[in-house]
Amino acid sequence: MNTKDILEKGAILQRDRETYAIAPHIPGGFTDTATLRKICDVADKYKLEVKLTSAQRIAMFGVKEEELDAVWADLAQAPGAAIGLCVRSIKICPGTQWCKRAVLDSASLGLKLDKIYHAMELPNKMKMGVSGCLLACSESGVKDIGIVGHNKGWRILVGGNSGPRPRLAELLVDNIQTEEEVLEIVAKVVEVYKNDPQQGRLGRLIEEKGIEAFRAAVLGSQDAAVGK
């Protein structure tokens, strides 16, 4: 009987202890009809169930261990980082291209973050959310790194998570004007996190250090961090 996930194949052991779930990487949930048709064709071929996930992916259930390689070969897609100690997902709202409420282009910024960070190995799992307005449809307030657009710029939140011990993210910096500046700050957050000896989620590190000390470690200036 199988007892473990197969990390290198992005396969999560299911309740029956015999079959696995996989999830192709769909950056920010943006895809095309050809990709969707391929997923459907593979699901039909191997008799798999499919489910839309909260991480903006399509999970495929019922994969037999001996068919994992064949399923991935037929999909011809990279696995989504649904398991492992890494950046699991960058959740992105529709942004200014589609949503009438969006203030800033969350899709552009989010896809850049996805390209840099998706599946990056870290001391623990990390999730990001990028929202184009204060409604924060990407649940930025409960992400390890949450980014929210508003009429004065980008707001960056840190240390949030859901799960059995939910934690709201805290304000790191506000009124950031450009995507490039956001990317630089996120890189510094990740660097500080990677280099710290603790092995918990980012929120646990912030609880231990305090948000002011963490802000200083990332930005070097508390006043600049809160947009003063």
Image (cartoon, rainbow, N blue to C red):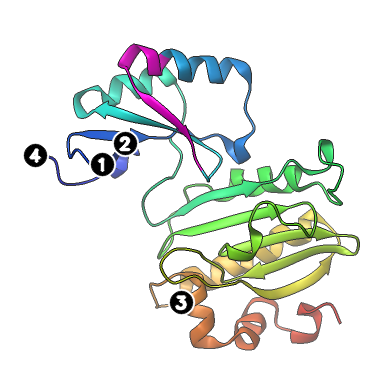
Looking at the picture, tell me which residue is in the foreground, 49 or 127.
49
**Depth-wise, is mark 4 or mark 3 nearer the camera?**
4
Quarter of image, res 96 = top right
**Depth-wise, is mark 3 or mark 1 nearer the camera?**
1
Disc 3 crowd, CA 10 A, few/some/many (<14, 14-19, 20+): few
Taking 136 as reference, is 142 left or right?
A: left
Mark 2 and mark 4 lie on one chain; the one further toward the N terminus is: 4
Taking 163 as reference, is 89 left or right?
A: right
Residue at mark 1 = 6
Q: Residue 1 — which label?
A: 4
Identity of the residue drawn at 52% across and 37% down = 57
Give how far apart the Cα atoms at labels 1 and 2 are: 6 Å
Tell me, yes or no, whether the two marked residues, 1 and 2, touch with CB atoms within 8 Å: yes
Give the amino acid at mark 4.
Met
Residue at mark 2 = 9
Give how far apart the Cα atoms at labels 2 and 4 are: 18 Å
- Magenta range is 42-53
**Depth-wise, is mark 3 or mark 2 nearer the camera?**
2
Residue 46 located within the stretch drawn in magenta: yes
> Circle 2 sits in a helix, a strand or a loop, which is it?
helix
Mark 3 and mark 2 lie on one chain; the one further toward the N terminus is: 2
Mark 4 and mark 3 lie on one chain; the one further toward the N terminus is: 4
